[in-house]
Amino acid sequence: MSKKGESSQLLREFPDFTDTMHSLVAMERIPAGVVEECREAVAMARRFNRTVARSYALELDRRMQEDPTFLPWELVEEANRWGFFTMWIPKLFGGKGWSLSSISPFVEELASECLAITNLIGVHYFGYSILVATWNIRLIDMISREVVEGEREGRPCLVSGAVTEPEAGTDAEEVELLARARVRCHARRVEGGYVVNGRKIFISNGHLSTWHILIAYEDLERPDETMIAFAVKNGMPGFSFGRMEKKMGQKGCPASELVFEDCFIPDENLLVAASQLTGMKRGARELGMQLIDFVVSATRPGVGAMGAGVARGAFELALRFARETEVAGKPLINHEWAQCLLAEMYKNAALARLSYMEANYSNSMYGMAKLLSFKPLYYYNRLIPTSMFDRWMPAANSRQATTAVFRKLVMDGQSDAEARRASGWASLAKVAGTDLGVRNCQLALELMGQAGLRHDRRAEKCLRDAKLLQIYEGTNQLNRLNVFKCLVAPAAPEARAFED
């Protein structure tokens, strides 16, 4: 059997993820059309893996090892040609308008081949999700249409999320920790805008992106109450790129330092300042936390899906090795110890998938995706061509009133209990998926022995890549605390999370 045919057979042997989706549709809580969208997204990712990622992943890893400053523009351009950077931009803003529920299965499929390539494509939507979570409709529309135009003209326009700082990484993703974080990215109010000073580090795709959604703070002593978000474009005076990190894994997706030295950001690029929001039912601190939760409730299931993908990829590598290798006169796959190990890996991959699917469901019901999961709006968005939206939405999106309506509708429309459910399940999926992904990579190496340490066998790369999943999007330690805060503590009123 050819390698290509064998790989296809392995993929068929793992249950199609839409088996899980059907159970959710049966609950009549999400539109049935989401299942078909997910199938299409997975099929597209599978074609991309077969024609692009499979032959390029090891070459890219070696190239980055030799030259850590190399920027894989050819891969960005190829993903742009496939239309990946506009698939999950709503039609309201000129994109293809795919359901947010389909991005995680798409990510899982990509990650089964290469986590670095997956992150390079998927992290664009981390930056975009911060942009959307501000509900600044004018800037969302403007930046989205630049991304769409960049796809049409063959000139990729990516968005990065600039949150992590040298002394405040995970702290910046939880409001209780943010209150005590040593943040240094300061935004000072001046006439016509703000002057920003500070650095952001470990910014995935930083050197590859055109727009950067920057989180800064007006008062460094009260960051939890004075969070402020800007849209920063390459070329703005005072903004520059620093070093690229020399990473152990996911080398193909650059991690950049962004430097702001008296960077003037005009008022027109201000996305949101929690302290300036009026007429909302929450105060500045609570609105800042809600902005964080809107983002991570959507993105952490995606990281869990990456964990599920590498768990499945490691399982497939181990299964192929067990079929091809003979030990003590019989195929390795016929040894009971190997069968038990493979069954354990299969279980891990399946559980990782189930956890992110549950988190996606929670986000659709209670998080950022809630509005677009409303069935009439979902089918309206799906069936109406983008060209019809383009006729009348740009003018409406440019009005401040549109932003005010969206913020009132979405932010005030989410209860505290709903926010806890979406955030808690997102953290659960992130922890479960990434831990199980790392475990399967370890088991694959255990089964393959010294053969697994060879670069051309891919298993050692899987483990190097997977380890990073436990660290970004909030460390797994933070996410465990968030699971406790959101899902356990409400049933135990005396319990307190994030205390000194």
Image (spheres, rainbow, N blue to C red):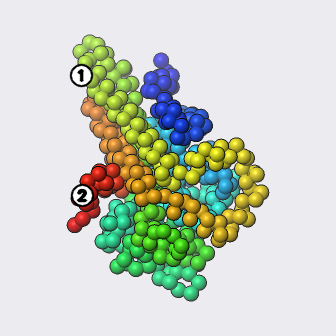
- The single residue placed furthest to the bottom in the displayed view is 191
Quarter of the image where one finds residue 287? bottom left
Q: Position of residue 331 (x, y in %)?
A: 31, 16
Q: Which residue shows up at 33% across the image and 22% down it?
A: 322
Q: Nearer the viewer, residue 230 or 253?
A: 230
In the rendered view, would you say 159 is above or below 262? above
Amino acid type of the residue tagged 2 in the rendering: Ala
Mark sitting on residue 495: 2
In the rendered view, would you say 353 is above or below 159? above
Q: Position of residue 430 (x, y in %)?
A: 37, 47
Quadrant location, the C terminus: bottom left
Q: Which residue shows up at 70% across the image and 43% down it?
A: 383
Mark sitting on residue 292: none
Amino acid type of the residue tagged 1 in the rendering: Trp
In the rendered view, would you say 431 is above or below 396? above
Q: Nearer the viewer, residue 404 or 231?
A: 404
Q: Which residue shows up at 51% across the image and 77% down it?
A: 276
Mark 2 or mark 1, whichever is nearer to me: 2
Of the residues under marks 2 and 1, which one precedes in the sequence?
Answer: 1
Q: Rate crowding at label 2 as few (under 14), some (14 to 19) or many (20 or more) other CA atoms within 10 Å.
A: few
Quarter of the image where one finds residue 320? top left
Quarter of the image where one finds residue 38? top right
In the rendered view, would you say 46 is above or below 137? above
Residue identifier under label 1: 337
Secondary element at image label 1: helix
Secondary element at image label 2: loop
Q: Nearer the viewer, residue 169 or 263?
A: 169
- Residue 188 visible to an observer of this rendering: yes
Q: Which residue shows up at 49% across the image and 39% down it?
A: 105
Q: Position of residue 438 (x, y in %)?
A: 32, 41
